[in-house]
Image: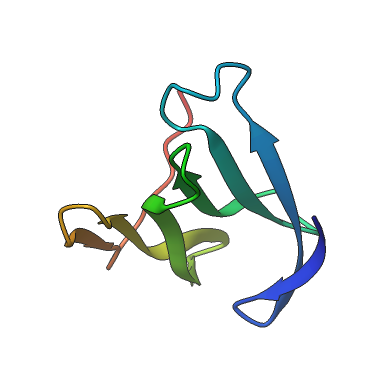
Amino acid sequence: VGPVRFLGRPAHMFSLFNPDPDSFPARVVVTVDEDYAALLEAEMFDRDGFLAKRMRVDGFKKFGEEWMFSGLTWENRRERASVRLKVYSFKSTNL
């Protein structure tokens, strides 16, 4: 689709099509951060072009020396329902 700005950052938007247009999702539009290649948003469309579901990053925060998303929102547009995850702390573990 092309370059865009998301949360004030340069990003790229891509439109992905399902080979079986009758199954869900028929199309997914993803937005990816230009510098970090992190997924910022995914929108799922049905075969009629209706935006049925969406997941988006609400922001980023530095926890110690590492960056992490500070919130995620999942939306089910058909059911008019959403779930929001807020991140208040984060600690990386080296396995």
Which residue of the protein is positioned furthest toward the front in this rendering?
48
- Taking depth in this image into account, of 80 and 31 the one nearest to the observer is 80
Vertical arrangement, residue 29 with respect to residue 85, above or below: above
Vertical arrangement, residue 54 with respect to residue 80, above or below: above
Residue 30 position, x and y percent, is 62, 49
Quadrant of res 15 = top right
Which quarter of the rendered picture does the N terminus lie within?
Answer: bottom right
Q: Residue at x 45, y 32 (%)?
A: 25
Quadrant of res 79 = bottom left
Residue 88 position, x and y percent, is 27, 68
Q: Residue at x 43, y 22 (%)?
A: 23
**Colour scheme used in the picture?**
rainbow
- Taking depth in this image into account, of 67 and 4 the one nearest to the observer is 4
Quadrant of res 2 = bottom right
**25 displayed left or right of 77:** right
Which quarter of the rendered picture does the C terminus lie within?
Answer: top left
Vertical arrangement, residue 69 with respect to residue 28, above or below: below
- Taking depth in this image into account, of 88 and 74 the one nearest to the observer is 74
Residue 82 position, x and y percent, is 20, 60
Q: Residue at x 52, y 32 (%)?
A: 26
